[in-house]
Amino acid sequence: FVYKNRWLGSGLRRELFYLLKRTNKIKCITPIRKFENFYYSYAKTRHFTTKIEQKALNDLWEHWRHKVLDYLILKQKYPEKIIIIKFEDLVNDTKNISKKLSKKLNIRYEKNMLNTTVLGNKSIGNSSFKKNKNVKGKVYKNSINRKLNIDMPPEYKEIYSLIDKVSL
C-alpha cells in the first residue's frame, strides 16, 4: 500500500490533540503495553538495568501512566480517530488483530501484515532485547508476559480496565 501522508512517532500526544481537533483525515493506532512488560524494556534502555529498582519503577510508572491516560483521553474525545490495541494481543494474536484493524481502517487484509517491516522491507523489529537475525520479518515475542513481583498502585487495575474496554 502507498499512503499519501503519514506521521509516525512516540510521545506525540500533545500534537495529536492539536491535529485531531483540526482535521478528520487522521487515524491514530496506538499499541499499549502492560506496565510489567513496559518496565523491563524501558528500564533496560533508560536506567540501564534489567532488575526491579525503585528509582526506575517511580520514573517508568509516571511515564507509562501519563502516556496511557493521554491516549485514553484522546480515545474518549475522538473515539473514531484513536484505535487502541493491547500490545500483548498484537504480538500473541497478530493475525486476528491485523484482521480487526484492517476492518476498522476499511482496508484489505493481506498476509504480509503478519510480518515486521519498515517501508515494505522485512525488519528485525524494535526491541531492547537481543535477537538473532533469523527473527527478521517475524513478530518478536520473547519479552511478553514478564512478571513484576511488586504491589502495583491501586489505579493500575482501573487504568487497565479502561484499556480493556476501549481496545480493538
Image (spheres, grey):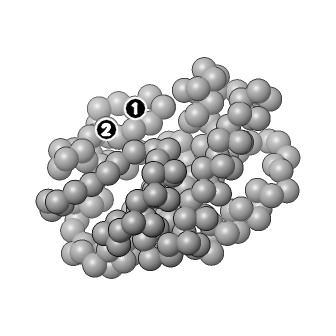
Could you say which is closer to the camera, residue 27 or residue 126?
27
Tag 2–tag 1 contact (CB < 8 Å): yes
Against 139, is 123 above or below? above
Residue 162 placement: quadrant? bottom right
Could you say which is closer to the camera, residue 105 or residue 125?
105
**Residue at the disc numbered 1:** 131
- Residue located at (58% from left, 26% from top): 46
Against 137, is 96 above or below? below
Question: Is residue 6 found left or right of 73 in the rendered image?
Answer: left
Checking the image for residue 124, the label placed there is: 2
Kindly state the secondary structure of the residue where label 2 is placed: loop
- Residue located at (21% from left, 68% from top): 110
Q: Residues within 10 Å of mark 1 (few under 14, many from 20)?
A: some
Question: Is residue 77 found left or right of 157 in the rendered image?
Answer: left
Residue 38 visible to an observer of this rendering: yes
Question: Is residue 17 found left or right of 166 in the rendered image?
Answer: left
Q: Position of residue 4 (x, y in %)?
A: 17, 60
Q: How many marks?
A: 2
Which amino acid is tagged 2?
Answer: Ile
